[in-house]
Structures are given as C-alpha cells and as structure tokens.
Image (tube, rainbow, N blue to C red):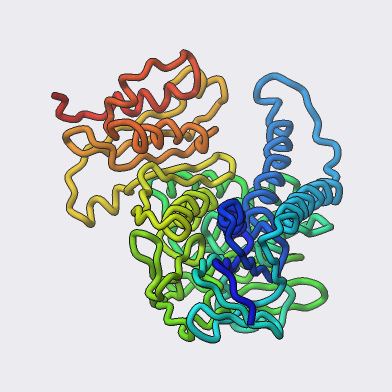
C-alpha cells in the first residue's frame, strides 16, 4: 500500500487542491477516471458556452433585418463548429494533465476509486492511503426511470456537445437550465426543438416572474410542453418517439431524430462506497459537510458538485480556497457564500442571486420589490430587448435579499449586485449610490434598485 500526505479524488477542481498541496511540498495522490478538468472543462461550462456563442452569432445574423441590416445566414458548418470546440476542450484537458504530471510530488492514478477503509482507497489493483483525503468526485446526468428508455439511443448533455451531425428534429426531456441552453443552441443552428418539462414553467427554480417570461419567450422559438411527464420512449426506423402525459391526463407523442435527456444531475458518490470510510451522505447521495467543508470522517473534506448547496463551477472554485485553508493549512475557516450567483446562457440570458419571491413568502420574510424593464432604458431599446427586466427583492431597511434578471447580458449585469453583497454593505444604497455610465445597459440595474421603496435612514 502506498501512503500519501493527501489523496484527492477527482481531477476537476480537485486538481487545484492537488497542486496547492504540491506547492506546500506534500506528497499527493490525485485520482481521476476520465480526462482531467472534470465536468466544466470536458462536458459542461467550457464546451457548452463556447458552442452557445456560435448560436448567439447565428441568432444575431438571423435578426439583423430588425435593425435595417441585410444579412443572410446561408450556411452553418455544424461539424466544423463542434470539431473546433472539441479540440479546444481536449487541448485544455491535456494542458491540465501535463501540469499535474510535471509535479514530482504528485502521483496521478487513472481509474475508479472506492473506499475500502478509513482514508484508504482501491484504484484498480492498487491500494492507497492518505493522512488527509479530499472528495471531489462531481456529478453526472441523472437518468429517470422512463419505460423503454434503456432500449433506445438517447443523448445526455455530454453526448449533445459532441454530435457530428445537426439533427433536423430534437426532442428534449427536461425543463431546467441544461434543457434550456442546449435547446437554444440546437434551435439557433437550425434544428426543430421540442421541450417536454414536468413543471408548469421552464427553469422552475428561478423567480416565478423570470421563469414565466422565459417560458413565453421559449414558446416563440420551440415547441414547449410544460406540465407533462414523459412516460414511455420507443424507437423505430431511426426515429425516437416520446409519449408524455399532462397533469390533467392529456397524452402527447413527439417523434424526432434525436432524444436528449436533460433531467438534472446526480452525485457520483454511489461509485465511491463512502460507508466504508465513515462518510455520511444525505438522502439524495450528496456528501454531508459542515461549515468548514469537513465530512463526518476524520481528516476527510469534500467540495464541488458532490456536496450541497451550490452546483456551479464558480462555487466549486470558491470552495477550493476553503479546502486549502482548512485541510492543508489547518485554519478552520467557515466557507462564506455571500455574493454567489448563477446564470443561464440562453437567449435571453437569465441570472440571479439570493432568494426568490416565493421563497421569501414561504419564510414569512417581509420584503419590497423594485423592477425595471429593459425597454425603459436607452440601451435596452437599442437592443430591441422587449421582454427583459431586472427584479430586486429587498428588506424594508434596504438589505438586498435577491435580484433576478432575464434579458441581454444578464450574466454580466448580475455581477454589480454580487459585488454589493460580497464586498459592499449588501444594501440597495450600494447600487444606487454608484455613478453609472450613461447609457450603458447597467442603467437597467440602477433603475430597478431606484424603484425599491425601502425605509431609507
């Protein structure tokens, strides 16, 4: 058995912990079954958002006539688009592998890891043990138990990023952010897309007004069936048919060239045998951690998509800082998620931070609302963004409780609010007291915050 000062399971953000330990002169084992970089680099954020940028370019050309500019979208070279993005993705993964292999104190194990005892793991035919262990095994697509699904060819989000042919028709099971992003990508490049979602709106975890607005916009682009449960899947003559039933019992059947199953993700902890190491999981399989990201097992920490509450790459990167402080440097510093937000890269974009209005109502929290439509700003009008808006939720004393955006560049605009929450006083005054460049699109954020009627001192 080989002993190490630290064993890191997972080569996504886990590779950052491994490199930090190597910088401190510690002996490190890094275990990864696939390409280094994890979900984000190989099958998530990096390839999907790079592909989606191509969709944005196509949509801009397609709508150029609205601005008095003649432009024709004569041809889309889909194989080239996917090939270029795949090469970029694989190249980044190779760079990460070389960076790990160049470090003398890091040993890279390629394979599936399973705990066989306290801080002891088996990888292939080898057993290794760490004085400390970091679990960063990530997550994978969750596949629902739909009748016939195992007998047909279907895509997960991983597969959908590497297709070599643009399908004429695509049916998507799922109504969350992955379904929304990939549905937009394929539609913008010429595929007829049908989305089937269980909830009564798409992206249901967003603030209700944002979700309703986004769903109506999506209906202009796709065929959208919300409030439908997929019950069966069949395949014949190269076509896949999904049968679904609405909440009131109405059946539908949708046939397409390809089926994308985008019904959420599940943690990879089921492959790890955590019980053997005394690591507790919650009822959905996520590793339970305390405020220091320590698990129930002594000298074992966890971070990333295999823990709660946030399953974003930027959350995992943020958590790495605390794993390094606590696991490597012994500081005992509680993780602080103040100012964390998220975004959905569709057209329009969606972004948010903090509580939704429904969550505040359920908690009995008193709040006030401020709002501004994009069309009520100079740049919003210039962009012809007729549906976008910024919604602010604040306590009566001006504390920012949440902010939700649907519209152009939402993923960028939300950072003004995140900065106020993380580095300012976290109040409405942080935004309204900042001089905004006119007529930049950020004026829509300023106007929404000015619209908040709170009890100013």
State which quadrant residue 5 falls in: bottom right
Q: Is residue 412 above or below residue 457?
A: below
Placement of the N terminus among the 4 image quadrants? bottom right
Q: Is residue 252 above or below residue 25?
A: below
Percent position (x, y) of residue 365?
Answer: 19, 49
Residue 330 appears left or right of 66: left
Which residue is pictured at 67% across the width and 50% down the height? 48
Which residue is pictured at 83% across the width and 43% down the height? 76
Percent position (x, y) of residue 162?
Answer: 77, 58
Residue 55 appears left or right of 317: right
Q: Is residue 416 above or below residue 296?
A: above
Of the pair 189 and 302, the residue shown nearer to us? 302
| Residue 204 seen in this snapshot | no
Which residue is pictured at 36% across the width and 38% down the height? 422
Which residue is pictured at 55% across the width and 39% down the height? 348
Percent position (x, y) of residue 125?
Answer: 71, 85
| Residue 250 seen in this snapshot | yes
Of the pair 345 and 40, the residue shown nearer to us? 40
Q: Is residue 339 above or below residue 150?
A: above
Percent position (x, y) of residue 366?
Answer: 17, 44
State which quadrant residue 103 falls in: bottom right
């Amino acid at each position: 058995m080989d002993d190490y000062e630290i064993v890191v399971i997972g080569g996504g953000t886990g590779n950052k912990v491994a490199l930090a330990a190597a910088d401190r002169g510690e002996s490190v084992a890094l275990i990864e079954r696939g390409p280094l970089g994890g979900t984000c680099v190989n099958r998530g954020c990096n390839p999907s958002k790079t592909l989606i940028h191509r969709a944005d370019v196509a949509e801009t050309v397609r709508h150029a006539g609205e601005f008095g500019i003649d432009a024709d979208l004569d041809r889309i070279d889909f194989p080239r688009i996917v090939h270029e993005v795949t090469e970029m993705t694989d190249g980044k993964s190779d760079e990460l592998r070389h960076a790990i292999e160049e470090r003398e104190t890091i040993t890279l194990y390629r394979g599936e890891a399973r705990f066989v005892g306290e801080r002891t793991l088996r990888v292939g035919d080898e057993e290794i043990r760490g004085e400390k262990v970091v679990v960063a095994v990530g997550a994978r697509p969750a596949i629902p138990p739909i009748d016939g699904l195992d007998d047909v060819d279907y895509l997960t989000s991983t597969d959908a990023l590497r297709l070599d042919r643009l399908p004429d028709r695509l049916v998507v099971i799922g109504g969350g952010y992955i379904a929304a992003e990939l549905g937009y990508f394929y539609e913008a490049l010429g595929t007829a897309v049908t989305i089937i979602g269980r909830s009564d709106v798409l992206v249901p975890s967003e603030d209700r007004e944002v979700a309703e607005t986004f769903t109506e916009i999506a209906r202009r682009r796709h065929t959208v069936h919300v409030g439908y449960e997929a019950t069966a899947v069949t395949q014949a003559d190269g076509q896949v048919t999904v049968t679904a039933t609405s909440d009131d019992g109405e059946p539908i059947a949708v046939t397409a060239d390809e089926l994308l199953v985008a019904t959420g993700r599940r943690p990879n902890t089921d492959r790890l045998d955590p019980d053997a190491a005394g690591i507790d999981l919650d009822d959905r399989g996520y590793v339970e951690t305390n405020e220091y990201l320590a698990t129930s097992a002594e000298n074992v920490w966890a971070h990333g998509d295999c823990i709660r509450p946030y399953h974003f790459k930027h959350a995992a990167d943020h958590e790495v800082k605390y794993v390094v402080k606590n696991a490597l440097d012994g500081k005992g510093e509680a993780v602080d998620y103040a100012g964390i937000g998220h975004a959905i890269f569709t057209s329009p974009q969606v972004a948010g931070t903090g509580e939704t209005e429904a969550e505040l109502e359920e908690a009995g929290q008193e709040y006030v609302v401020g709002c501004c439509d994009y069309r009520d700003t100079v740049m919003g009008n210039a962009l012809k963004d007729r549906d976008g808006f910024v919604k602010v939720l604040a306590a009566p004393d001006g504390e920012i409780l949440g902010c939700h955006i649907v519209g152009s560049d939402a993923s960028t605009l939300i950072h003004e609010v995140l900065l106020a929450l993380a580095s300012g006083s976290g109040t409405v005054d942080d935004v309204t007291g900042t001089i905004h460049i006119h007529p930049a699109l950020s004026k829509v954020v300023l106007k929404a915050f000015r619209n908040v009627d709170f009890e100013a001192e």
